[in-house]
Image (cartoon, helix red, strand yellow):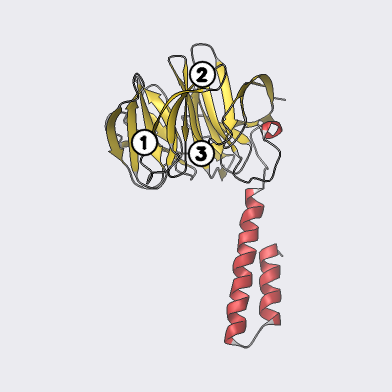
Amino acid sequence: MTLRNAIAFYAIGFLRGQLLVRVCALTFMLLALCLDVVAMAGDVSTVAPVVGVRVVARLPHDEQAFTQGLFFSDGRLYETTGRRGASNLRELNPDTGRVVRSVALAPRYFGEGATAVDGRAVWLTWTSGRAFSFDLGDLSPGPKYQYHGQGWGLAWDGARLVMSNGTPELVFRDPQSFEPVSRLVVHDGAQPVHRLNELEWVDGELWANVWLTARVAVIDPVTGRVRRWIDLSPLVPTGENPNSVANGIAWDSATGRLLVTGKLWPVIYVIEPLHEP
């Protein structure tokens, strides 16, 4: 018997017979369902191999930055942050982590992931169904785009934008019109991978943070299969803030430099993944 069934059975048996009792029993059942969901979220069983990382260097990072996206463009490091009234596109000094310059979204928008496309940043919003673009030369605003559903993460594979929305499905989009051109379901073995978040194109593979975990899914961009998992759990700050999750992957294709960080983390890590066991 699952935890959900046990709680529901006890509640209904104990409080049977009255309308108020039935309402209480339903409440117990909903509570049990929530517990089951939490249990599933904590299930880390995988088919793909899990590998760790070696920390090459540590860079300072703004502990107030609710990191949603991290990316390189022409050797320059950029970050997008979220929360309404605090959503910024920032250029960071890649050696010190200091904010060099920034531009903010209007307070009504909750910024999400972003990526660089032909000298401009394309930046998602969470629930507004709108993406913004900015010229990375002077951070001046460019075209805006609309889409259905939520926006979470964004990457550029050299020809198409790749967008996540918190589900196992990735949407490939035309970089000029932002219209969908194809879709891909991400899976580990037979199981779909939910809560795909920040995305990065890394040497022919799609890397994705998975919200509420410290793992990065390394995805085959043709089949959607998770080839391996990168375990970042040793890098997660200690503390009780549930929002301080791993989120942010940046790969410099010119140097091979690979950076990771998280929401409200004090550090950006330069890493090297370890070999598969």
Query: What is the distance, in whole Å, between disc 1 and disc 3 at their CAs?
Result: 18 Å
From this viewpoint, is residue 32 visible?
Answer: yes
Query: Above or below — where is 166 with respect to 257?
Result: below
From this viewpoint, is residue 270 visible?
Answer: no
Q: Is residue 212 left or right of residue 130?
A: right
Which comes sooner in the sequence, label 1 or label 3?
Answer: 1
Q: Is residue 277 left or right of residue 254?
A: right
Disc 2 marks a residue whose amino acid type is Asn
Residue 228 image offset from top left, x and y in percent: 62, 30
Tell me the residue that label 3 is attached to. 197
Element at badge 2?
loop
Residue drawn 67% across the image and 68% down it? 5
Q: Is residue 111 left or right of residue 244?
A: left
Query: Above or below — where is 111 with respect to 257?
Result: below
Disc 1 marks a residue whose amino acid type is Ser
Checking the image for residue 182, the label placed there is 1
Checking the image for residue 93, the label placed there is 2
Which comes sooner in the sequence, label 2 or label 3?
Answer: 2
Image depth: mark 2 or mark 3 in front: 2
Front position in the image: 233 or 160: 233
Residue 168 image offset from top left, x and y in percent: 49, 43
Image quarter of residue 20: bottom right
Query: Above or below — where is 118 with respect to 236?
Result: above
